[in-house]
Image: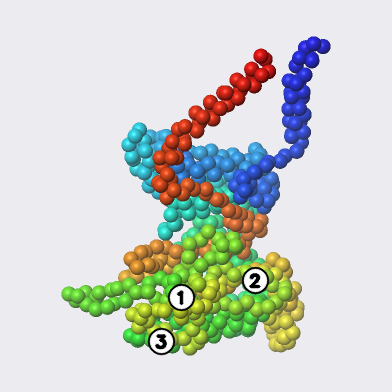
Amino acid sequence: MKFLKAHINTILLIGILIFVNVVGSFFFKRFDLTEEKRYSISDPTKDFLKNLDDVVTIRVYLTGNLPSGMRELEKSIENTLNEFKAYAGTQLEFEFVDLAAYDKEVQEEEGKILMSKGLNPISLTVVESGEQTQRILFPGAIISYKGRMLSTTLLENKVGYDQYQILNNSMVLVEYKLANAIQKLQQTHQPLLAFSNGHGEVPQAQLGEVIKDLQAQQFAVSTIDLSIGNKVDDLVDVLIFAKPTQAFTEKEKYKIDQYLMRGGKILWLLDQMAVDMDSLMGKDFYLAQARDINLDDMLFQYGVRINDDLILDLQNTRLEIQTGFLNNQPQMQWFNWPYYNLMLGNDAHPVSRNLAPIAGRFTSTIDTIKNGSIQKEVLLTSSAYAKALFAPARVYLGLVKESMDPALFRQVDLPTAVYLSGEFPSIFRNRAFTGAYAAMIDTIEELKYIDKSSADAKMIVISDGDMITNQERKGKQLPVGYATYGANNDAMVFDNKPFFLNCVEYLMDENNLIETRNKVVKLRQLDLTKVKEKKGIIQLNALVSPVLILSLFGLLYTFIRRRKFA
């Protein structure tokens, strides 16, 4: 009895711990006390991780002797994977692989394997044994599932971003990148994307880069000629129109309409104005007219209208123009070209969040039409210094030599890309069908007319048909989104391709994983200016404060003991 009285507190503590552990074995809960929920994953991610039917293995190659910023990213990846494992249990395994720990020959061999799987290396300066050395790093991961593999890059190293923006964007996208890769490997069939052809669309050769990237992301890519057959194949997951220049027939529009009514997904990249740089060949100016491809009424019915105009924007990329000859060699110079506008993403939407600007060419404005059953969300806009020229719009080469007054560019955030979802009304509602086609759709069950779409139907409309094309310069193909900008003619690849890939992902995303792109991670950085100004005070504080705190604690502890036992 004396023993129990003497140790009752200890016994109670042990009992409480045992009780909490027993209860905890039946209930699962994790607490994230950070303001931005840094250590939490989204509900869609949790749901599909709980339902994994086989083991997912993730090998991360961002580890080892890293600079401080990279170590933060590594820690963020590790925290995210620990969260994944908390919900997936034994169905998820992960490891961090440091290639620098292996012999040089092994590093080279492993590097070749990783590059063949789609991971590109970067060069970093690190300090080893007190000396600076260059190290090759693969900032990504390889995900394996049921014998299939997929790579994903975890460092969003964008040109024009400082190290804090790069680090922040990378940490924000860790969950999405990993979860999206697992979701792709889980797919029981390869999603099919079909590019329309037969209407003067962009040639496949100019789409080679985006097609290669789509295939690398486990999409099957094909073409479809709407003049053939009676319907769009049900196997087509997303129908893509890349800058058609010839009119669609009513029969072709019917196929598109009924594909949408059956829950189809459509991505439109349309040039409303018939103009390109070839139009100015040998001329000082060109009057751009509206291009009639017989889709205006269909898009209007679905809740959107591409206007007959051209956007001029003070935020733009540049145009190379020949200014003369020197020693029989043409002299080229870069000029601001407001018809090549930069489009800015809507940070409130996961498709365009955390993206650099998108380079546009002869872009038009988009209006949304009031329709209660259709939801509309703007994805891209012009800058705050833009204006729209209505058709016929004068494209004037001499504009490059004129100083542009910002007071004349007062139209703000002109929409250039819109996402639409909901119940779309058929454009053929209340129309009378006649002839052989009417008899066919009345008798063939799979061609039965539907006048309202299912809730699965979605579409994205972009008023720039050239956004995903490879441009050419001096006979060489340039990357998608390549352009020059700024006073120093700096060249960079804008985020045209990531935006396009996000559009496809969003239309296809059944688990709504892309919503995780809306996550916010705050980097609480020191104010370097104040640090520099008060360097001495900070150093003194760091040196003296711990000693004072320990001394104060010691004095207080001694005082309490004397009061208690004196």
- Give the mark, 1 or 3, whose residue is nearer the N terminus: 3
Q: Residues within 10 Å of mark 1 (few under 14, many from 20)?
A: many
Q: Amino acid at mark 1?
A: Asp
Residue 286 is tagged as 3
**Residue 447 at x, y percent in the picture:** 71, 75
**Residue 471 at x, y percent in the picture:** 40, 70
Q: Amino acid at mark 3?
A: Tyr
Q: Amino acid at mark 2?
A: Lys
Task: Residue at the far top: name it.
Answer: 2
**Residue 59 at x, y percent in the picture:** 52, 42
Rendered view: 209 above or below 199: above
The structure residue drawn at horizontal position 57% and vertical position 23%, both measured from the top left corner, is 555
Contact, CB < 8 Å: mark 1 with mark 3? no
| Quadrant of the rendering where the C terminus is positioned | top right
| Quadrant of the rendering where the N terminus is positioned | top right
Q: Residues within 10 Å of mark 2 (few under 14, many from 20)?
A: many
Q: Give me the C-alpha separation between circle 3 and circle 2.
A: 34 Å
Contact, CB < 8 Å: mark 3 with mark 2? no
Residue 239 appears in the rendering: no
Q: Give me the C-alpha separation between circle 1 and circle 3.
A: 18 Å
Q: For marks 1 and 3, give the one nearer the viewer.
A: 1
Residue 473 appears in the rendering: yes
Callout 2: helix, strand or loop?
Answer: strand
Q: Give me the C-alpha separation between circle 2 and circle 1.
A: 24 Å
Residue for badge 1: 313
- Foreground: 348 or 61? 348
Residue for badge 2: 376
* In this picture, residue 177 sits left or right of residue 108: right
Task: Residue at the far left: name it.
Answer: 327
Rendered view: 536 above or below 457: above
The structure residue drawn at horizontal position 65% and vertical position 51%, both measured from the top left corner, is 42
